[in-house]
Image (tube, helix red, strand yellow):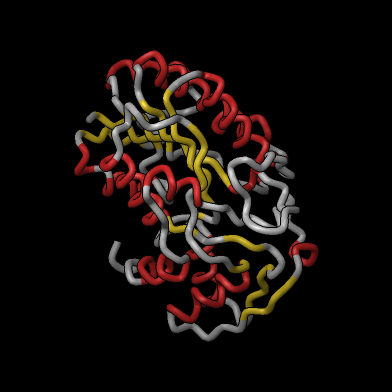
């Protein structure tokens, strides 16, 4: 199996490069090796490598900046994805693409299923939904995995930001009225690798699947758990979304129902606390 992995340095991408290695030849690219803003370079790379599977772990993820940088968000999360889907169809390859809980408005009581109608409330969510729809419309074989609150042991993510802030500030103020499931890049990568290795890909139905950690918390609860697991005692004060005053609105409820993933592939991610424990132990070793 030849796998073209796009976005090898991201929260999921770095873990995917390791997790997919036993499945065959992995051609892993970063922005220098494949610029998603250059649509011709996408066609050239896929034409050269002729992958059996394209895994797109790259995305524009700056949620607040997207509010004033709409063109860039849509260029990466929609236009580039459309070309990748077209190339996957031309090559008869499987496209594995990642989307977001932010395609929903957060008004539902309970976890969102794949049958619930998307209604994004920020530009980032709109761009991710556009990417989903372009993949579906392309007719390529695809798995679209919606995940949530993705983090890892390094890079720009909530875990690393909280650890840095806790060591620099006397007190933290963190939103406590947004609910979701923090999902580690390592857990995502392990699940995708299992799906690609265990499944008869030619017989698996294309579609959208929710792929997030079990359990739920708030950003405030997540922050407190991060500090506890890293022996930090910085006080964490709960605040409302209004008090945080971010540029982009966030869904109050980001919970995803993962039943379809389990029914289709026999895969279920562990509780978010277990994922955090595993990542916390790797922070100083990766």
Nearer-the-camera pick, 133 or 205: 205
**In the rendered image of this protein, does residue 267 appear above or below residue 60?**
below
Residue 66 falls in which quadrant of the image? top right
Q: Quadrant of the C terminus?
A: bottom left
Please tell me which residue is depicted at 36% across the width and 16% down the height of the picture: 44
Q: Is residue 153 left or right of residue 116?
A: left
The x and y percentages for residue 191 are 36, 50
Residue lying farthest front? Answer: 263
The x and y percentages for residue 138 are 51, 19
**In the rendered image of this protein, does residue 114 appear above or below residue 162?**
above
Nearer-the-camera pick, 197 or 19: 197
Q: Quadrant of the N terminus?
A: top left
Please tell me which residue is depicted at 34% across the width and 35% down the height of the picture: 5
The x and y percentages for residue 50 are 28, 20
Residue 47 falls in which quadrant of the image? top left
The x and y percentages for residue 171 are 63, 80
């Amino acid at each position: 199996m030849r796998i073209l992995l796009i976005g090898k340095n991201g929260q999921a991408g770095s873990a995917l490069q390791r997790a997919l290695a036993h499945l065959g030849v992995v051609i892993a690219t970063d922005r220098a090796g494949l610029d998603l803003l250059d649509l011709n370079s996408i066609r050239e790379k896929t034409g050269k490598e002729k992958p059996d599977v394209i895994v797109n772990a790259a995305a524009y993820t700056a949620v607040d900046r997207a509010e004033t940088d709409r063109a860039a968000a849509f260029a990466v999360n929609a236009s580039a994805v459309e070309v990748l889907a077209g190339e996957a169809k031309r090559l008869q390859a499987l496209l594995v693409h990642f989307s977001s809980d932010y395609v929903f408005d957060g008004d539902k009581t309970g976890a969102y299923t794949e049958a619930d109608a998307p209604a994004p409330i920020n530009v980032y969510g709109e761009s991710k939904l556009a990417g989903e729809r372009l993949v579906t419309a392309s007719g390529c074989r695809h798995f679209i995995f919606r995940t949530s609150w993705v983090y890892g042991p390094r890079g720009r993510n909530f875990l690393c930001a909280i650890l840095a802030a806790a060591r620099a500030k006397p007190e933290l103020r963190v939103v406590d009225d947004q609910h979701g499931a923090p999902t580690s890049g390592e857990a995502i990568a392990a699940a995708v690798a299992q799906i690609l290795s265990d499944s008869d890909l030619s017989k698996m139905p294309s579609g959208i699947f929710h792929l997030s950690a079990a359990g739920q918390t708030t950003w405030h609860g997540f922050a407190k758990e991060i500090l506890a697991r890293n022996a930090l005692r910085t006080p964490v004060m709960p605040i409302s979304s209004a008090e945080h005053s971010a540029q982009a609105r966030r869904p109050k409820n980001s919970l995803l129902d993962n039943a379809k993933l389990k029914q289709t592939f026999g895969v279920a991610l562990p509780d978010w606390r277990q994922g955090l424990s595993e990542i916390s132990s790797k922070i100083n070793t990766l």
